[in-house]
Image: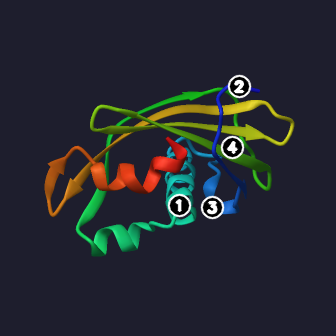
Amino acid sequence: MSDTKYIFELPMKVRDYEVDSEGIVNNAIYLHYLEHTRHEFCEQAGFSFRRMHSQGIDPVLSRVEISYKRPLTLGESFVSKLAISRQGPLFVFVQDIYNMSGEAVVKALVKVATLENGRLTRGDILAEKFAPYL
């Protein structure tokens, strides 16, 4: 396992429509797993995406880097883990997915910028909400 200090974990399971003709999870599906993990983290932190948007705050992807380590297959359980830090105005998520044997499946670095009422900002409102995790 990684020495990253994860602050959120989400167990999930591969569904039948997420695998390709080879019986493994399609590469693009991992983006969905990562996004779902961020959404669930935000909800746990008390600031759901719906609530953010209703207040004019929209986190938007700036950059995503994914290293695929090993495939997941139909019905396989896994855990998606997340750590968060700040790099200037960006929120940086280290997001890793592990199979139930503890082997790395995906290692990802996700950078998120913040729009407030359609304008790029430093993300100070989100930083306040995420303060306990930063």
Compare marks 4 and 2 and give the one earlier in the sequence.
2
Q: Quadrant of the N terminus?
A: top right
- Kindly identify the amino acid type of the residue bearing the numbered disc 4: Ile
Residue that carries the numbered disc 4 in the rendered image: 24
Pinpoint residue 75: horizontal percent, then vertical percent: 79, 56
- What residue lies at 49% left-to-right and 59% top-to-bottom? 42
Residue that carries the numbered disc 2 in the rendered image: 2
- Kindly identify the amino acid type of the residue bearing the numbered disc 3: Tyr
> Residue 19, relative to residue 48: is it above or below?
above
Mark 1 secondary-structure assignment = loop
Q: How is the image coloured?
A: rainbow
Residue that carries the numbered disc 3 in the rendered image: 17
Classify residue 117 as left or right of residue 85: left
Mark 2 secondary-structure assignment = loop
Residue contact between numbered discs 1 and 4, judged by CB atoms under 8 Å: no
- What residue lies at 51% left-to-right and 53% top-to-bottom? 38
